[in-house]
Amino acid sequence: NAGVTQTPKFQVLKTGQSMTLQCAQDMNHEYMSWYRQDPGMGLRLIHYSVGAGITDQGEVPNGYNVSRSTTEDFPLRLLSAAPSQTSVYFCASSLTSGSFGYEQFFGPGTRLTVL
Amino acid sequence: GQQLNQSPQSMFIQEGEDVSMNCTSSSIFNTWLWYKQDPGEGPVLLIALYKAGELTSNGRLTAQFGITRKDSFLNISASIPSDVGIYFCAGQRSGGSNYKLTFGKGTLLTVNP
């Protein structure tokens, strides 16, 4: 298993540009989520999904859109990039049942800079 | 949103020393997880705790689920240079269909060889 994969690894955008961060998992996990990590702030939840066709907002959703058309993929869209969205973005996934339902597995991250 | 209170924020220790860090919350958590993040990488799960009072080990790491359900502790014994990184605690507040995790802000560990 490749686990959770994210592309690209690095990205530089100009203010106002849009882009999509890709996330895929091959563990058949129902739950997928996006976090952003900023210095001294820990990990903050942006959006999450408990299955294909179901998404919901997390703690910091403004400026981001998500969709979940398949179990495997959970892309994150930046609609109009702003410097405040400069961050490291992590995708994570987990099962939603059983003893291990809450153990989230993380991807390697996408490092985004908005100029 | 609520974040867990994780302490200390950073630690600088000598190789071979033991390390202790903890997380506290004003709310009850049903699950506690401890992650480690190496520079430039994503967090990796170290230990998961599911019952109040539970004590679980993973090699030189030992974690405990506090009896009040409002705290958790991580100990690292006989530290080595590869223990360097950021350690995060995470809690899952309620059961049922709520799978969201709340994270602490992390403890940055530096080990001097």
Image: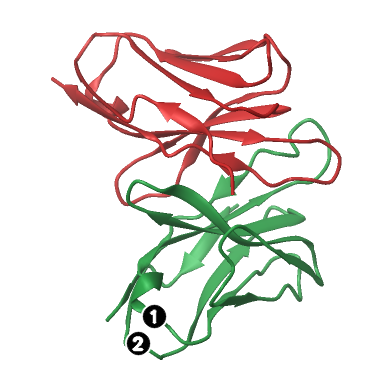
The numbered disc on residue A15 is 2
Q: Is A25 left or right of A43, judged from the image as shown?
A: right
Q: Looking at the picture, does residue A73 appear above or below residue A108?
A: below
The numbered disc on residue A28 is none
Q: Which chain is green?
A: A
Q: Which SS class for mark 1?
A: loop
Q: Chain of mark 1?
A: A
The hue in which chain B appears in the rendered picture of the protein: red
Q: Where does the C terminus of chain A fall, quadrant-wise?
A: bottom left
Report whether residue B31 is seen.
yes
Asked which quadrant contains residue A67, the reply is bottom right
Q: Looking at the picture, does residue A45 appear above or below residue B70?
A: below
Asked which quadrant contains residue B28, the reply is top right
**Disc 1 crowd, CA 10 A, few/some/many (<14, 14-19, 20+):** some
**Disc 2 crowd, CA 10 A, few/some/many (<14, 14-19, 20+):** some
Question: Label 1, on which residue?
Answer: A82
Q: Which SS class for mark 2?
A: loop
Q: Amino acid at mark 2?
A: Thr
Q: Chain of mark 2?
A: A
Report whether residue A2 is seen.
no
Q: Residue furthest front?
A: B26
Residue that appears at 43% across and 59% down: A109
Please tell me which residue lies in front, A24 or B62: B62
Where residue A52 appears, as percent x and y from the top left, is 80, 68
Q: Amino acid at mark 1?
A: Ala
Where residue A23 appears, as percent x and y from the top left, is 57, 67
